[in-house]
Amino acid sequence: MKMDSYAVPVTDDSWAVGTASTTTLFDWDYADSREKMRSLYQKGKDRQWDAAKRIDWTRPIDHDNPLGVPDAFIPISSSRVWGKLTEKEKANVRRHMAAWQFSQFLHGEQGALICTAKIVQTVPDLDAKYYAGTQVMDEARHVETYSRYIREKLELAYPINPNLATLLEQIVADSRWDFTYLGMQILIEGLALAAFGNIRDMATEPTAREVNAYVMQDEARHVTFGRMALREYYPQLSDAERAEREEFTVEALYFMRDRFNQAEVWMRSGLPVDQLMEHAYNSGAMQSFRSRLFTRIVPILKEIGLFGPKVQKALGDMGVMEYAKIDVDQLLGNDLKVAEDFDAKKFVQDAIAAE
């Protein structure tokens, strides 16, 4: 319904309702607008799934190695401390490591649920509200899924990491809709995709692999949603506005690289925290993770126009500037395909079982 379809003249095509902390925007123009955004909305509707049905929750796990990963997956596995642990103590660390990871996934997904609901409230365009509505459902399902995995499989949980809490607080507290996109859809989702991908690709425990593959299928669309919105909006910014967003981005990148660690796991396991923090940071496992982290974020920052001298200097200092050349569409497309491959494999297994 276009603006000129109203029986009574409408003077404004939108309505802003302000509070002390945020501004809620209504859009009165219901006409079809951006084709790509509507197409993404359709995909968001078509690809809804039920975690209770798509995932087989009946399979047992090995509590001595819940994810079925090699010890190289544990950042302290090459340390002298690890070498002195008994097999029982190593098993305890593996379980706590898995519980810590999945707990942070769970808390981060609740943050994404809250942020996406905020996007519905604050973004000015109705087609963006449409898609964000499907993402709210996605994020609710992710919270449900990780919560169930922790309760039924790991039977152990950790509170939110203080550093993740700090980053979420900054994103949620800012009233500007594009900061929510930038902080959640680009930066935290990029962080999440790296962590999810590690388990999807390295774990052998099938339920953990399925959970992360299916969540990544949704997240690939979410990142695309953020890219589409910001690459249209950011060219309109003033130099001062763009500089403010680049400053936030640089701080967040260093924060994600340097501050997300498993200190709580080493402490809870009775291990020397300070010694292991340094070892874990320099471990091959964490270097691989940081590499995955930047493969998606860097090319997207370039695409949306947050690629000024300060951002480029930071990326150069981190040694990840070459990632700007990555075809992010191909990466996200692979995230979609891997989940479909999981479904195809399950279909074949079910057919064989039926015969």
Image (cartoon, grey):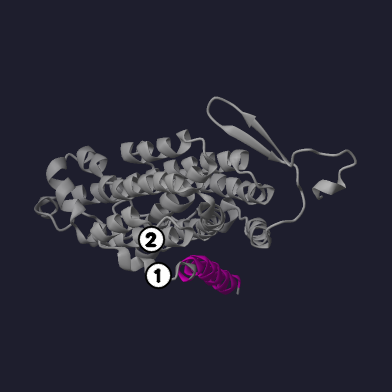
Report the residue at 33% width, 49% height from top.
250
Task: Look at mark 2 in the image and give the residue it sits on.
Answer: 298
Q: Secondary structure at mark 1?
A: loop
Neighbours of disc 1 within 10 Å: few (<14), some (14-19), many (20+): some
Tell me: 43 left or right of 172: right
Residue at 60% of width from left, 43% of height from top? 123
Element class at badge 2: helix
Give the answer, above or below, for where 303 lies relative to 153: below
Residue projecting furthest to the top:
20
Answer yes or no: is residue 271 visible. Answer: no
Residue type, mark 2 in image: Val
In 3D space, how far apart are the residues under numbered discs 2 and 1 (Cα atoms)?
8 Å
Magenta region: 330-354
Say whether residue 332 is magenta: yes
Residue 326 marker: 1
Q: Main secondary structure of the magenta part?
A: helix
Rendered location of residue 292, percent (x, y)? 34, 62
Q: Is residue 197 visible?
A: yes
- Is 240 inside the magenta-drawn segment? no
Indicate the position of residue 326 as horizontal and vertical percent values: 40, 70
Q: Nearer the viewer, residue 148 or 58?
A: 148
Identify the amino acid type marked 1: Ile
The local crowd at label 2, few if under 14, some if 14 to 19, many if 20 or more residues have their Cα within 10 Å, is: many
Q: Position of residue 348 (x, y in %)?
A: 56, 73
